[in-house]
Amino acid sequence: MRVSVIGGSSIDDETAEVARQVGRLLGERGHTLVCGGLGGVMAPACEGAREADRREASERASGRTDRREGRHASREHDAETIGILPTTRRTDANAWVTTPIATGLGNARNPLVVLNGDAVIAIDGAAGTLSELGHALDHGRPVAGLDTHGVDLDGFRAVETPRDAVEFVESRAGDRG
């Protein structure tokens, strides 16, 4: 499943850790992370997904099992992080984006970020995040919100923890293809 992670472009250390945990959980569960590809929430979320991938690769090499699921830790491919960039240069992507997509669209790329996910996790954020929330809900994407804009609309749920966010989107999105 692809999960779009959206949120603030200027964040504090606590929010960065929340984003990193969300990314790590998505990576551990084999989901593809889609984001705007720059800094703020996007960089630690991508970093978390890639950390999960490195940890699983280490476990595979040592033959250890995945204690969370009681199964052998393996996936067919590396954790993928897609960055849909507002700029014209793929090199503008943060260091943890595996697939940078340059658009040259500025904030007009926001719908592309949410439409390329089967579900959305919003963390913190300001006006840009609010616009992405609107596009996500308008197009039927379930949204889990962690310390973000509160909206009283079908498809949105405010959650308390990164695990709650991931479990909510998994339960609501399925595999949209």
Image: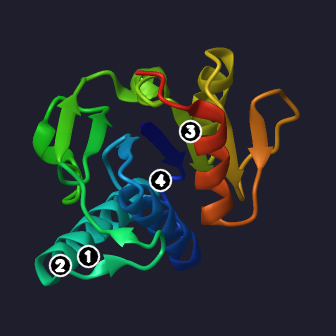
**For the residues marked 2 and 1, what is the alpha-carbon distance in whole angstroms?**
5 Å
Q: Real-space Cα distance between discs 1 and 4?
A: 27 Å
> Where, by quadrant of the figure, is residue 101 drawn?
top left
Task: Name the spot of residue 145 as percent of width and height, x first.
Answer: 69, 49
The three-letter code of the residue at mark 3 reads Val
- Mark nearest the camera among 4 and 2 is 2
Of callouts 3 and 1, the N-terminal one: 1
Query: Tag 2: Cα neighbours inside 10 Å, few (<14), some, or many (≥20)?
Result: few
Q: Is residue 123 visible?
A: no
- Residue 120, label in figure: 3
Secondary structure under the numbered disc 3 in the rendered image: strand
Which quadrant would the C terminus be assigned to in this image? top left
Q: Which mark is residue 55?
A: 1
Q: For residue 58, which numbered disc appears in the image?
A: 2
Contact? badges 4 and 3 (CB < 8 Å): no
Marks 4/3: CA–CA distance? 16 Å
Residue 148's tag is: none
Q: Which mark is residue 9?
A: 4
C-alpha distance separating marks 2 and 3: 29 Å
Q: Are marks 2 and 1 in contact (CB under 8 Å)?
A: yes
